[in-house]
Amino acid sequence: MKTLQDFNFKDKKALIRVDFNVPLDADFNVTDATRIQAAKPTIDAILADGGSVILMSHLGRPKGKEDKYSLQHIVQKTAEILGKEVKFAADCRGKIAEEAAQNLKSGEILLLENLRFYAEEEGGDKGFAQELASLGDIYVNDAFGTAHRAHASTAIIAEYFPESKCFGKLLATEIESLNKVLKASKKPVTAVLGGSKVSSKITVIENILDKIDHLIIGGGMTFTFIKAQGGKIGNSICEDDKQEMALDILRIAKEKGVQVHLPVDVVAANAFSNDADTKIVAINEIPDGWQGLDAGPKSLEEIKPVILSSKTILWNGPLGVFEMDTFSKGTIELGKYISEATQNGAFSLVGGGDSVAAVKQFNLEDEMSYVSTGGGAMLEMLEGKILPGIDAILK
Ligand code: AMP
C-alpha cells in the first residue's frame, strides 16, 4: 500500500483528489468544513516536503456548469484552514487549468473548478482522466467519500500514473481503521447496527457475521426482526418483505456462533413527534397506535456489559430517532458505553452518515478511536466490496 512516505515531493506537483463536497448556506458560506480539515494533513505534508499541490474535487450534483456549485465559493475557507493562499483555476481542464498548473511553484496550492461540471467525470471517461493526469507528477487519492465510485478523478486517472500514485493520509487511515475491524485481531468484536432499515444493512450484516462475536441490533430495523418472530410491533416501522431475511440472519448468526442482542423493551410513542406521549413497553407487546422510537432502559442495561467487554467495536446507525430529544437517550447512552470501552483500550470505529451526525451532535467525536468520513464508501467496504478508488492505487 503506497502512501506519501514512498515519494519525495520536492519540486513535484501532487495532483490530489480530495472530497471538498461541503455544505454551503444560501450565501455560499461553508457551514461544515470537516472535509477540508480532513485533507489538511496530506496537503501540509506534501508542501513541507517541497512539493506543490493541485486539488481536485466535486461539489454537489451540478447539471453542467452551475455557479452555485462552483468551488470558488470554498477558496477562502480552504485558505483559512490551510493558512496559505489558495489559487483557483476557473476550469478543471483545458488552457485555464494547464496554465495554472504550469505556473504553480513549490509550496503553492491550486484548487481546480468542480470536476462534475463535466459529465465525463462521473462517466469515468478516459480522455478526461488523461487530461487531468497531465496536470500533475504524482497522483494522490485522499477522497474516501468517493472511493466507491469509478469516476475519472477517483479511479480511472490512476492508470496514467503507473508508478507514481499513492493514498493520502486520510484515505490510508480510513483503510487501516476499517481493516482493524474487518481483520480484527482484538476480540471480542461487537458490531452495533441501528438506523431505520434492515434492507440497507443486509449485505453488511452478511459480510461481518464471520468477523464478529456480538451483533447488537437497534433502531427502526429492530421491528422487522420482532415481527418476524411473532411479536406485536404496533405502528412501528417495519419492512414486511424483509421478515424472511431477518430470520435467515438470526439463523446464520447462530450457526456461526455470533450472539445477537435484540432489544427487550422500547420507548413507545403515540405519535412520531417530540411532544408525543411515551411509555416503556416490552419490545414484542407494542399496542396498536403506538410506535417504538428509542431503546428502552432494560435493553440498554443488557448491551452495556457487552460493549464494555468488547475489544473492537463497530457502530453504524442510531438506536432511536436521535434527532428528537425525547428519543435520543438510547443513542447517547450507547455513545457513552462505547466511549468508556474506548478509554479502557478498545478500538471503536463509527461510520455511516447518521451515526456520525449523532456522535457530533452529542460531542462524542473525540471519544471514539476513529470516526469515518465516508458513509457509502464505508458501508461498501463493510459489505466486502473492493472499492474502485482503492483498487486503482493498489494495482
Ligand atoms: P439509517 O440511515 O438507515 O442509518 O437510519 C437513520 C435514521 O433512522 C435516523 O434518522 C433515525 O431517526 C431513524 N430511526 C432510528 N430508530 C428509529 C425508529 N425506531 N423508528 C423510526 N426511525 C428510526
Image (spheres, rainbow, N blue to C red):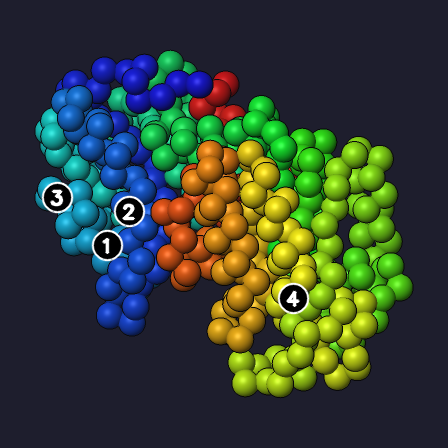
Mark nearer the viewer, 1 or 2: 2
Q: Quadrant of residue 86?
A: top left
Q: Which residue is mark 2?
A: 36
Circle 4 sits in a helix, a strand or a loop, which is it?
A: loop
Instruction: State whether residue 136 appears in this view.
Output: yes
Relative to 181, does residue 199 appear above or below in the rendering?
A: below
Q: Are marks 1 and 2 in contact (CB under 8 Å)?
A: yes
Circle 2 sits in a helix, a strand or a loop, which is it?
A: helix
Mark nearer the viewer, 4 or 3: 4
Q: Amino acid at mark 2?
A: Ile
Mark sitting earlier along the chain (4/3): 3
Q: Which residue is mark 4?
A: 296
- Name which residue lies at 52% across and 67% down: 328
Mark nearer the viewer, 2 or 4: 4
Residue 318: x and y, percent?
A: 56, 58
Mark nearer the viewer, 3 or 1: 3
Q: Which residue is mark 3?
A: 83
Mark sitting earlier along the chain (3/1): 1
Task: Please state which of residues 387 and 256 is positioned toward the viewer in this rendering.
Answer: 256
Q: Is residue 390 left or right of residue 302?
A: left
Instruction: Count residues near mark 3 (Cα–Cα under 10 Å), then give few for <14, some for 14-19, many for 20+.
Output: few
- Name which residue lies at 59% across and 38% down: 310
Q: Which residue is mark 1?
A: 74
Q: Are marks 3 and 1 in contact (CB under 8 Å)?
A: no
Q: Quadrant of residue 37?
A: top left
Residue at mark 3 to residue at mark 2: CA–CA distance:
12 Å
Residue at mark 1 to residue at mark 4: CA–CA distance:
43 Å
* Quarter that holds the N terminus: top left
